[in-house]
Image (cartoon, grey):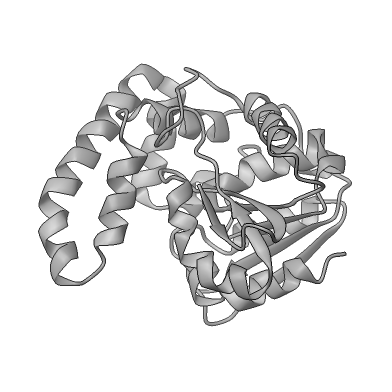
Amino acid sequence: MEFGNPEGTPLVALHGIPSCGRAFEALDGAARARYLRVIAPDRPGIGASTRAPGHDLRLVVDDLRELVDALDVDAPHLLGFSGGAAYAYAAARWDASAYRSITVVSGTGSPSLEARDRAYTLFDQSCFAVARKAPALLGPALGLVARTATVLGAPVAARRDNAEQWETLQFTFAHGGGGAADDYRATCTPWGFELAAITAPITLFHGRADRIVRPWIARVSARELDNATLHLMPDAGHDLLHTHVNDVLDDIVRNP
């Protein structure tokens, strides 16, 4: 999916887990104002994308390069949000020259970080555990959770005028839970590199009030990276990309 200015400077945005590219629709106005074209692909098995069972970080990095080449865009910016951070880090490790800048917002950390899982919600911790020990069970379980949440939550969402949240959930699991399960497994098992091996500059934004991904993950990740700039936002939670979208996009467009 695409948002922002269709003629603008390209920004490839990588969604969280479980989520899909349409979650970046909230960036549309701010991106237009900054002459940014937001390209938000769905990963395999998510939304409109065909599943590649057991996909790993390398496959997605290669898919991103193919997408950039197919769209004939020159040196886009890259942004990884939440669980999409793993794929942004992988692109920084294996294909950094393809991107003008790399930004991680509210990002998860490397599976090699000590006590990493305790930085996340109980739901995500459970998904990581099943993804490691019984990955075949996670897809059907996530599909069931999504269907139940959609049925029970849609009326509440309609009353609270946030139906878009539930539409995004439905689209994420349009083909069941297999794609999201692959995402969990790919990001919580060894990546094939350490953050210290990344030499490309990376900017990190994280909220001090984040309760979905605890802020110490950002601090440790920034220390391990060779060339990182960390912005800890004192009044921000996990939805920093929405509440502080101007800060994030302004920082991105400052990169030549």
Q: Is residue 164 above or below residue 197?
A: below
Residue at the bottom extreme?
Answer: 235
Which of 142/67 is in front?
67
Which of 141/78 is in front?
78
The answer to whether one can see residue 113 in this image is no
What percent of the width, then of the height, locates residue 180? 41, 34
What percent of the width, then of the height, locates residue 198? 83, 43
Residue at the front extreme?
Answer: 7
Quadrant position of the C terminus in the picture? bottom right
Which of 23/200 is in front?
23
Q: Is residue 168 above or below residue 130?
A: below
Residue drawn at x 89%, y 46% is 199
Q: How many marks?
A: 0
Q: Is residue 58 above or below residue 225?
A: above
Left or right: 156 as drawn, with respect to 20: left
What percent of the width, then of the height, locates residue 210? 49, 67
Question: Residue 93 is drawn in which quadrant?
Answer: top right
What percent of the width, then of the height, locates residue 187? 56, 35
Residue drawn at x 38%, y 28% is 130
Q: Is residue 1 above or below residue 42?
A: below
The answer to whether one can see residue 83 in this image is yes
Question: Residue 247 is drawn in which quadrant?
Answer: bottom right
Left or right: 34 as drawn, with respect to 180: right
Residue drawn at x 57%, y 73% is 30
